[in-house]
Image: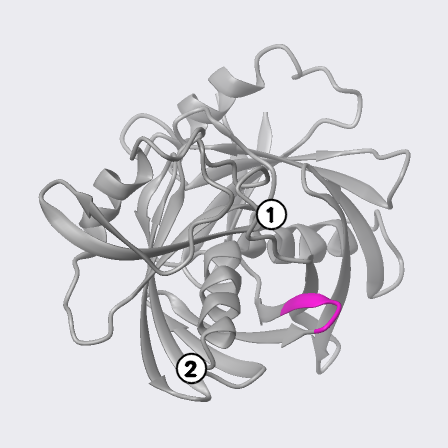
Amino acid sequence: MKFTKMQGIGNDFIFIEDLDNKFLDNETEIAKKLCNRHFGIGADGLIIVRNSTIADMKMTIINSDGSRANMCGNAIRCFGRYIYDKGYVKDIKFTVETGDGIKGITLILEKDKITGAKVYMGIPSFSGKDIPLSNKKELINEVTNINNKDYKLTSVLVGVPHTIVIKEDKEYDVSEGKFIEKFECFNEGTNVNFVEVINRDHIKVETWERGAGATLACGTGTCASAVVAHKFNLINKKVLASLPGGELIIEVEEDGVYMTGNAEYICVGEAL
């Protein structure tokens, strides 16, 4: 099985192609094997390249633990560069089918080389039905005691569910996300983002990802963090987000959220 490994600000992925859908029955097992950092190649997730009948191409995402994700911001930037370089799309603007619907991508060209992409991430939702929450219409700025510690939580769907903790005058360790992830009000678990507002144009984000643990970066989580900080009037519409693995530009507009960042190759090879 031939593979390509890529990363977007430290969030790493293994890409395989399945244009004939021959891996549908065992894609979960493939993901867990290839993503294992001791017995496999090692990655935060497996990205499968497939044909689409409703967009230019289709992206399937499986986390390192075998769970599925509808969307991943860092992965889709890498996906965009991958399918362009492979010749599956000819223009730098195209669409990708995801579990969260069709996403529009514009690749970034620097000296005739693709270095990253700007992605339309969709319209965020605070609805408890969308996240989904149990017996709650929404979860916004609500103090919740989890594992004997109080957190002020806000949950929003940006492709996948995210719960935001704005640090304010308190310190948190990203590993605390494992307790929030599986809290009883989250029917399908949640990703958790700890956000520090530096100023109105700059935030720092650390993410605990559902199904992957602490990662160097999370695109959807960074978008969700900017959406919540903007909702609370803590930042401007366009913000620089610093993550352990690098930086993203997030823009919160009337028609939804836009994310701009890098997409880099690590290696290519053949998995046995």
Can you say whether 140 is above or below 15 in the image? Answer: below
Q: Within the image, what quadrant is residue 254 found in?
A: bottom right
Amino acid of disc 1 = Gly
Tell me the number on the disc at residue 159: 1
Q: Which of the two labelled residues, at mark 1 and mark 2, occupies the earlier sequence position?
A: 1
Amino acid of disc 2 = Leu
Seen at 82% across and 33% down, the residue is 51
On the question of residue 118 being in view, the answer is: no
Can you say whether 147 is above or below 220 in the image? Answer: above
Q: Within the image, what quadrant is residue 252 found in?
A: bottom right
Seen at 48% across and 16% down, the residue is 29
Disc nearest the viewer among 1 and 2? 2
Mark 2 nearby-residue class (10 Å; few <14, some 14–19, many ≥20):
some
- Residue 188 lies in magenta, yes or no? no
Relative to 179, is 250 on the left or the right?
A: right
Work out which quarter of the rendered image holds the N terminus and state it. top right
Seen at 36% across and 34% down, the residue is 185
Q: Residue 181's x, y, as percent?
A: 32, 39
Can you say whether 271 is above or below 232 in the image? Answer: above
Relative to 120, is 137 on the left or the right?
A: left
Residue receiving disc 2:
234
Q: Residue 154's x, y, as percent?
A: 40, 56
Q: Residue 60's x, y, as percent?
A: 65, 34
| Magenta region | 254-258
